[in-house]
Amino acid sequence: MRRGSIVALLGIGVIAGGAATAVALVPTWLPKDASREAGRIDFVFWFVIAICIGIFAIVVAVMIFAILRFRVQEDDHEDGPPVHGHTGLEITWTAIPFVLVTAIAIVSAIVLSRNDAEAGNTLHINVTAQQYAWTFAYPDANNATSPVLRLPEGRSIELDMRSLDVIHAFFVPEFRTNEDLVPGLVTNVHITPTRTGTFPLICNELCGLGHSLMRTQAIVMKPTAFDAWLKQQQKSTKG
Amino acid sequence: MTTTETAHDVQHAPASTRGPVRRLILGAGLLRGAWMFLAFGGFGFGLVVLIRWLAHWHPIIETQSLVLVAGLVTAPLGFLAGIGAFDYWARYCIGSPTREEDHSGHGARSWRDYFRVNTDHKVIGVQYLVTTVFFFLAGGLLALLVRAELARPGTQYFDPQTYNGLFSVHASLMIFLFVIPAFAGLANFVVPLMLGAADMAFPRLNALSFWLLPVAGIMMLSSFIVGAFAGGWTGYAPLNSDHQPLGAIFFNQGVQWAGASSIMTALNFLVTIITMRAPGMTFWRLPLLVWANFTTSLLVVIATPFIAGSQFFVMFDRVMHTHFFDVGAGGYPLGYQHIFWFYSHPAVYIMMLPGFGIASEVISVFSRKPIFGYRLMALSLMAIVVLGFSVWAHHMFTSGMSSWLRVPMMITTLLIAVPTGIKIFSWLATIWEGKLHLRTPMLFALGFLSMFVIGGLSGVMLGAVPIDIHVTDTYFIVAHIHYVLFGGSVFTIFAGIYYWFPKMTGRMYNEKLGKLHFWLTFVGFNLTFFPMHILGTEGMIRRVADYPPRFENLNMFISLASFGLGASVIVFLYNMITSWRFGEIAPANPWRAMTLEWQVTSPPPTFNFDEIPQVVGSPYEYGVPGAQHAVLAPSKAREMEEVSV
């Protein structure tokens, strides 16, 4: 290859990579995170995005360069050089993706085990889903129930989830959590909220005609406010 | 219309002594299909009523079992028997003398022959393609209705039942009635020719496989009459085994007909490819399209019975009150998902490997270079087949399945990117320093290459469990599957249709319109599906008619783009119809390709080759002086020199 070609190829690669990076950075992709787990998941997201941008830039650069450079007129009846393969190249593009996906797998597995690990002093909440409503019960407060999920900031929380009819799913985009609620099983979600606020809580498994309306909220409160609210709920449940 | 005349036609036409009216009513054909449809339907109806009456079950007239038995089983069987799909075997079974094979069902002499049971693989290939394009249009219209509803938040045009039916039937038609059978149709036409064979191994089975398709497609479409199945194409239990309108069994049963068609075709391909290769056609001389269909067929025969089973279980739960997925009686809902995805993940490769084959043919021919790393290309197909069976639970990372399964399934999922990457890089190396002719098939192949890279990379993202936990069941998934199945499969189907159009019809398509179609599709596709990635990561979930107002602008944009994408199909249809009728007469080998289908006339003679060709080398020796893929009979070779340009 001539030096000019290499420069052109690199140039197209940089433009393609730059365009892809701009697409990755300019729009808001992920909603602002509100749990410790979300931060780790976002790390994996951007780690893989970076690798993807690199691969995308290489493929697009080679393709666009080839189209610009090797295109011929229709009456050109010549054939290209009869190159059948190149063992070194073939080993390279088997080995490098192998290394990259292995790296992704390792990072993912570490994040997964960290996110699943339960800290001490965990607050347990029972979640029950049915067509098309959510119920949250607090065993620490005599199973006081609430139609919205209220959580204390900064504490490790374990949701024990059940479904009464069909499969539903628990999804709070700001927590980066998604888990199905399956009839006959108890499934779990582990969250550590890091930011107070009100976040949408959505059923994310087609569960029937009211599926798109099966929404409520997850409200993260300051621990003291949460405790006060829980006491209040407990009283009204008794009364 | 492909019109082929051979000496066989006149000599062996079946001599019938029947009068014309009797022949019209009793002879195999659409009319007999219609009355036998009604007769068999009536028989099924009577049988159910009789059994219920004898068993003292009430009510005696029960809609669900009647619709299932009479409408979805016996009546379609009657139709198939009526058009003559079983005639030969039926005669054989009852000991009646079978007619001597006179090849009257071979070749097409007029357009009417395409509406009959025909055993010619070339006619069947065209039947497949026309039928699947019809269902592509139907499925596409449903998608546009979905986008119309989604243009604004809140409910616009459809109630939730209809809306859920729209996207469920859209997906089912596109998967079972377009992508899978369109590839089968292209392969039906091309594979026997590429092998140097006169036809498929089992021509009558081939005809039956085709005719099962319209039955399956009409079944899925007509579910709208009784309340469309609205549980998504994945049909998860217990939602679909219990809480759905009657249309759900139309899906359960439609999948059986389409699946049976797929399995029979795959078996036919396997036997054809293994036993009917021309002398000298070793496995390492097979064109990659044949390799692709060989590996696809392996996937189909091993995997498809699993989806058949899963749909039977769901239907049994509904109709016969079994308890496969009824928790109250010891059922296990996750069992459905495991069985379903054990088919439906390999199905992703069933919908992609044939496209890889088409891309290999087109890219090599229009780059005028041998395919780069031929053996590794073939082996990577086999690697995808093997790995493809070990990744199904990546659809279930958040399903509540045993959590230990997630990491092993993540590793196999990510590893499958390696053989896929090999293919992409090998195609890039094939175009490198080639002599690129950017004809329409090549544009679609290169479009496929660039779009499939995006679909593959978003697939790697989804393979990483932590990312999947956030974006599962959101529009990110919708974007990903459309980059893979539209950017991947549909682009290669278009590439294949344009590439073999001259061979199939004997006429050239209009190049300008072809290129216009490509650019409209390419731009419309990206504008429609790329923004869905952003919607998904922001948290917009799929399968909902209503969504929070903050997603409104992007959704409106996507809907407008999708109407543009829909309009691009008009250019395609206009081009196909006018070129088929009035196009320039095609030479035998307009692309100067080496594979065998281009070494015979366009369209090929009824029995493909006058004499069996002798294969002497690789099918991709472009640029090698004096290289030949096959030697045809000398008389034929001379004729070819005169015909070819």
Image (spheres, rainbow, N blue to C red):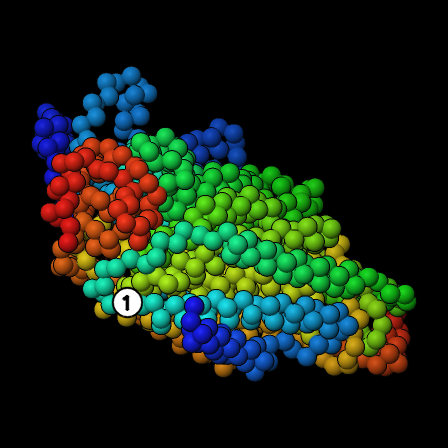
Whole-percent x, y for residue B46 in the image: 39, 33
Q: In this figure, which residue is indicated by the disc labeled 1?
A: A72
Chain at numbered mark 1 = A
Residue A155 higher or lower than B72, as above or below: below
| Rendered residue at 26%/65% (across/down) | B514
Residue B85 appearing in the image: no
- Which SS class for mark 1? loop
In this rendered view, identify the residue nearer to me: B201 or B253.
B201
* Quadrant into which the C terminus of chain A falls: bottom right
| Rendered residue at 30%/37% (across/down) | B615
Would you say A21 lies left or right of B183 here? right
Quadrant of the image occupied by residue B538: bottom right
Whole-percent x, y for residue B518 in the image: 32, 67
Q: Residues within 10 Å of mark 1 (few under 14, many from 20)?
A: some
| Rendered residue at 48%/72% (across/down) | B530
In this rendered view, identify the residue nearer to me: A59 or B263.
A59
